[in-house]
Image: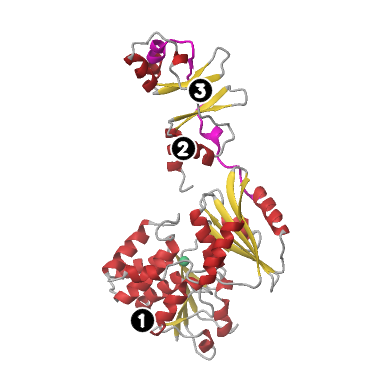
Amino acid sequence: MNILLGHTNMDLDCIGSIVMARYLFPGYIPVKSRLIHPIANNLYNLYQNHLGFINPLELKDAVVEHVVVFDTRSRKRVREYFDRLGEEWQGKIDIYDHHVNDSLDIPGATLHECTYGSNTTFLCEKLIEKDIEITANDATIALCGIFADTGNFTHQNVDPMDFTAAAWLMKMGANKNIAMKFLSKLSEEYQVTLFHQVLNNLSIKNVHGHSIAIVYMELEEQVNGMAAVIEKAFEIEHCDAIFGIIGFCDSGNTLIVGRSRKEAIDMLPILGDWGGGGHSRAGSALLKKKFGIFIIDEFLFHLSSELLPAINAEDLMTVNVLTINENMTILEASLYLEEINHTGAPVEDDRGKLSGFITLRDISKARKVQQMHSRVKGYMTKKVYTSEKNASIREIEMIFNKHHIGHIPVVDQEKNIQGILTRRDYLDFLSQQKQI
Ligand SMILES: [Mn+2]
């Protein structure tokens, strides 16, 4: 007998991968995990006859020759199956996995890897290459896997191939409406309740300029689906990363769930040091027999030693600022702006302190009323939105969004101009970032 299996706590991407793999490995039997991830529960229940998964208990007396593993390369995530096969089992193992940052620790396995957002995509790619057609039902199940692992194509990990695979599945008859039904993150009533609790308990901390949402909660007993709850809160909170620290009174264990929007906040080292794992943007750690509110401080301390300072205004600003003196005439200012080819410039007083901002628009107002020989002082904008050197990207972004301005002078406490930030500097920064 030959078998197909995914990681423990089987999720939609595992099921999608296995359903696609059945076309590549005809006659192979899929084995289900003893735990099914809450998000995959409804799909699994509805399609279980069609899926035809067997229970790992049935492996006990079976003679298994070839095992194909999907969506993990980590031994501890497939232990429930290999334990059944027995210690002396020595068959062939192939792995199809997209967790490229995890280390392969399944002895003797041959690894086939990809960097796609969804592992199901990887299997779809193989089917596309081989020109194999699939049923509409299977296409729907696979589409769920792709939607789930790419966060409906919004996650950082999304690859063009994920779109290609999804397009192919639609062509094979995948039903998007059915797929969307299975993708609701908070499928259970209690998750919705917990979600509201998370929002109420959330606080935002600034760790080296990164805005980090932290929530600490104690629950009577361990519940499933906590990661989905934290993820949902992350969707609506405007922060760089979120960490849910959830203590379970019954076991005395604490679960940490982390999600990040920034390359600079990598879950693998942060949670890896605490015995956890996952992807760089999404991870979790279970602290065994560790429980209590003191974990927040310990964790924040750990974060501050792990994270490098975030990019700030100083990193993005232009330092040689071309300024205009407030006692120049509008005509002089106009000629000067033309010469330096800028649409506006900060204005300083005779002591060199920022006193306003003048733009071509202000100048044209003066021109209309033939006041070109008036002083800049009279036509400049006096209320200038400024920032300080150590302002975070978020603060800068907020100034641009709120005030519809093109330039932000960077000043010190005495209003000495230290630099200037333009909307262009900010947009350039954004396009260099994979995602912030
Ligand atoms: Mn996956």
Whole-percent x and y of residue 164? 32, 61
Residue that carries the numbered disc 1 in the rendered image: 26
Residue span colored magenta: 306-335
Q: CA distance from mark 1 to mark 3?
A: 68 Å
For the N terminus, the quadrant is bottom left
Residue 214 vertical position relative to residue 250 in the rendered view, above or below = above
Q: Give, as a three-letter code, the residue at label 1.
A: Pro
Q: Nearer the viewer, residue 43 or 13?
A: 43
Crowding at label 2, few (<14), some or many (≥20) Cα neighbours within 10 Å?
A: few
Q: For the residue labelled by badge 1, is the local secondary structure a helix, a strand or a loop?
A: loop
- Of badges 1 and 2, the one in the foreground is 2
Crowding at label 3, few (<14), some or many (≥20) Cα neighbours within 10 Å?
A: few
Whole-percent x and y of residue 77? 56, 72
Q: CA distance from mark 2 to mark 3?
A: 26 Å
For residue 402, the mark is 2
Q: Residue at x 56, y 57 (%)?
A: 199
For residue 164, the mark is none
Choose top left, top right, bottom left or bottom right for residue 80.
bottom right
Q: For the residue labelled by badge 3, is the local secondary structure a helix, a strand or a loop?
A: loop
Q: Give, as a three-letter code, the residue at label 3.
A: Asn
> Does label 2 or label 3 sit earlier along the sequence?
3
- Of badges 2 and 3, the one in the foreground is 2
Q: Give, as a three-letter code, the residue at label 2.
A: Lys
Whole-percent x and y of residue 239? 54, 49
> Does label 1 or label 3 sit earlier along the sequence?
1
Residue that carries the numbered disc 3 in the rendered image: 320
